[in-house]
Image (cartoon, helix red, strand yellow):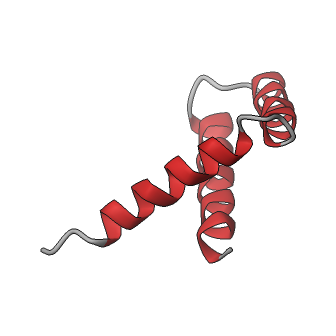
Amino acid sequence: MAVSISAVVLLGIITFLLIKKGGLNAAHAIVCTLFGFYLASSSIAPTISKATMSLVDMIGGIKF
C-alpha cells in the first residue's frame, strides 16, 4: 500500500509540474486522470499492479 500511495504522490507532482512548466494543459491532465480511474476498474488493473510491484521490487533490489 505504501508503494501505491507514493506512486500517486509522485505522479501527482509530475502532473502538476507538467501543467505549470511543460506543455500539458489542464484538459490533458483531466483526461489522463479519468483514463486512470477507468483503467483501475478494468480487468487489466491486476496485471498493471503486478507489473508495477515487480518493477519496484527490481529497483529495490539494486545494490549501489
Q: How many marks?
A: 0
Task: Give how far across and how far down residue 40 sits, in percent.
Answer: 80, 42
Q: Relative to the observer, which residue lies in front, 4 or 41?
A: 41
Residue for point 68% across, 58% down: 8
Q: Relative to the observer, which residue lies in front, 14 or 37?
A: 37
Horizontal side of residue 23 vs 44, given as left or right: left
Horizontal side of residue 40 vs 57, given as left or right: right
Up the image or down, 24 lies above or below 45; here it is: above
Residue, far left? 64
Up the image or down, 19 lies above or below 52; here it is: above
Q: Quadrant of the N terminus?
A: bottom right
Q: Relative to the observer, which residue lies in front, 35 or 57?
A: 57
Horizontal side of residue 56 vs 1, given as left or right: left
Residue for point 85% across, 40% down: 37
Residue for point 66% across, 42% down: 15
Task: Give how far across and how far down residue 62 sits, in percent.
Answer: 21, 68
Picture quadrant where residue 41 is located: top right
Task: Give how far across and how far down residue 14 sits, in percent.
Answer: 58, 47
Picture quadrant where residue 6 is located: bottom right
Picture quadrant where residue 10 is located: bottom right
Up the image or down, 9 lies above or below 35; here it is: below
Residue for point 12% across, 74% down: 64
Horizontal side of residue 20 vs 30, given as left or right: left
